[in-house]
Amino acid sequence: MVTQKKAKKASESINSRLALVMKSGKYCLGFKQTLKTLRQGKAKLVIIANNTPPLRKSEIEYYAMLAKTGVHHFAGNNIELGTACGRYFRVCTLSVTDPGDSDIIRNMPTDAQ
């Protein structure tokens, strides 16, 4: 089991990397846009909130598997993911197309497993 302190530190590092992507990189928010970027092969990483409906989650995971793209399951719900993105609305899924200055792609897929 992961201690509470370690889990909090991991979520803070995820949030800080996500904020850096929002500032310096390129991304797409939302289910439809995420599917578009996956089909085009532009997505480098997909982040999914933990309260995403199972059918949507499995569809995104399937597309990501076909596109050989990493998937990270965000620890918080869609409200917390929206807040981590610096938005005032809910974000169910988000795809990172260009990480910018962040090292989110190198570190995320290993954290997800």
Image: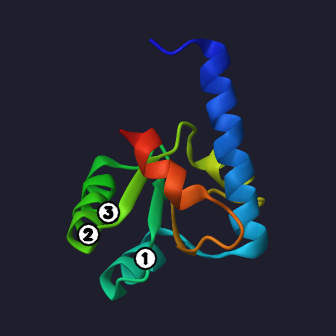
In the image, taking residue 111 as reference, residue 60 lies left or right, namely left
Q: How is the image coloured?
A: rainbow
Quadrant of image for the N terminus: top left
Q: Which residue is mark 3?
A: 60
Which label belongs to residue 63? 2
Say above or below: 67 vs 13: below
In the image, taking residue 54 as reference, residue 28 lies left or right, namely right
Q: Which residue is mark 1?
A: 32
Labels 1 & 2 near each other (Cβ < 8 A): no
Point out residue 6 in the picture as x, y percentages from the top left corner: 62, 20
Residue at 28% across / 58% down in the picture? Answer: 61
Residue at 39% across / 55% down in the picture? Answer: 71
Label 2 is placed on what type of residue? Tyr
Point out residue 21 in the picture as x, y percentages from the top left corner: 69, 66
Rounded to the nearest whole Å, what is the CA distance between mark 1 and mark 2?
12 Å
Labels 2 & 3 near each other (Cβ < 8 A): yes
Label 3 is placed on what type of residue? Ile
Picture quadrant of residue 32? bottom left
Say above or below: 98 vs 82: below
Label 1 or label 2, whichever comes before in sequence order:
1
Labels 1 & 3 near each other (Cβ < 8 A): no
User: Looking at the image, which is closer to me, 29 or 99?
Assistant: 99
**Label 3, residues with CA under 10 Å away: few <14, some 14-19, many ≥20:** many
User: Looking at the image, which is closer to me, 51 or 97?
Assistant: 97
Rounded to the nearest whole Å, what is the CA distance between mark 2 and mark 3?
5 Å
